[in-house]
């Protein structure tokens, strides 16, 4: 059974930084890309970023390009999302997810096969 466990959310001031972690277990490395969706109140869940397990290619939503960096440590089966220059509009529940990279690019959350429980990121002064 695939499990994804997030950590690292919290409250940060605008312009600050946070690092999210997603620890994966129960599946064969290389089967899926792993990344993040986020959902703000009264908004659709959107794909933020993902990283392929094979060639480490990455995807970023336009809204986070240049501010967020995704990386993975295959030895620890952990994916990280470094979030810098945070803005109030980044406030959301961030969900770790595993699936085809195209699903992240299309924000096709309904067809993502594996999810974490989510971690709240609040950007506020």
Image (spheres, rainbow, N blue to C red):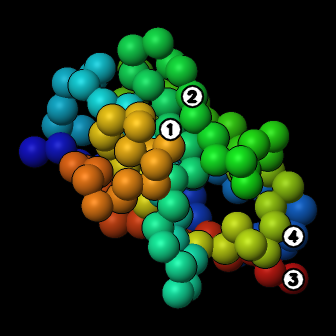
Q: Are marks 4 and 2 in contact (CB under 8 Å)?
A: no
Quarter of the image for residue 100 reads top left
Given this view, does label 2 or label 3 mark the residue nearer the observer? 2
Report, in whole angstroms, how far the alpha carbon at label 4 lies from the one at label 3: 7 Å
Q: Earlier in the sequence, mark 4 or mark 3?
A: 4
Q: Are marks 4 and 3 in contact (CB under 8 Å)?
A: yes
Report, in whole angstroms, how far the alpha carbon at label 2 lies from the one at label 3: 31 Å
In the image, residue 65 sits, relative to residue 124, either above or below, namely above
Left or right side of 25 for 48:
right
Report, in whole angstroms, how far the alpha carbon at label 1 lies from the one at label 3: 29 Å
Q: Are marks 2 and 3 in contact (CB under 8 Å)?
A: no
Quarter of the image for residue 52 reads top left
Pointer 1 local density, CA inside 10 Å: few below 14, some 14–19, many at least 20: many
**Label 4, on which residue?**
14
Q: Secondary structure at mark 2?
A: strand
Q: Which mark is residue 58?
A: 2
């Amino acid at each position: 059974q695939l499990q994804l466990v997030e950590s690292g959310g919290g409250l940060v001031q605008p312009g600050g930084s946070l690092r999210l972690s997603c620890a994966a277990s129960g599946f064969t490395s290389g089967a899926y890309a792993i990344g993040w969706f986020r959902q703000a109140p009264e908004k659709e869940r959107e794909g933020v970023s993902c990283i392929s397990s094979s060639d480490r290619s990455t995807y970023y939503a336009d809204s986070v390009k240049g501010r967020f960096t995704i990386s993975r440590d295959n030895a620890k089966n952990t994916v990280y999302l470094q979030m810098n220059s945070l803005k109030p509009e980044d406030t959301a529940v961030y969900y770790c997810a595993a699936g085809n990279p195209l699903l992240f690019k299309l924000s096709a959350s309904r067809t993502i096969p594996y999810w974490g429980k989510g971690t709240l990121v609040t950007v506020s002064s």
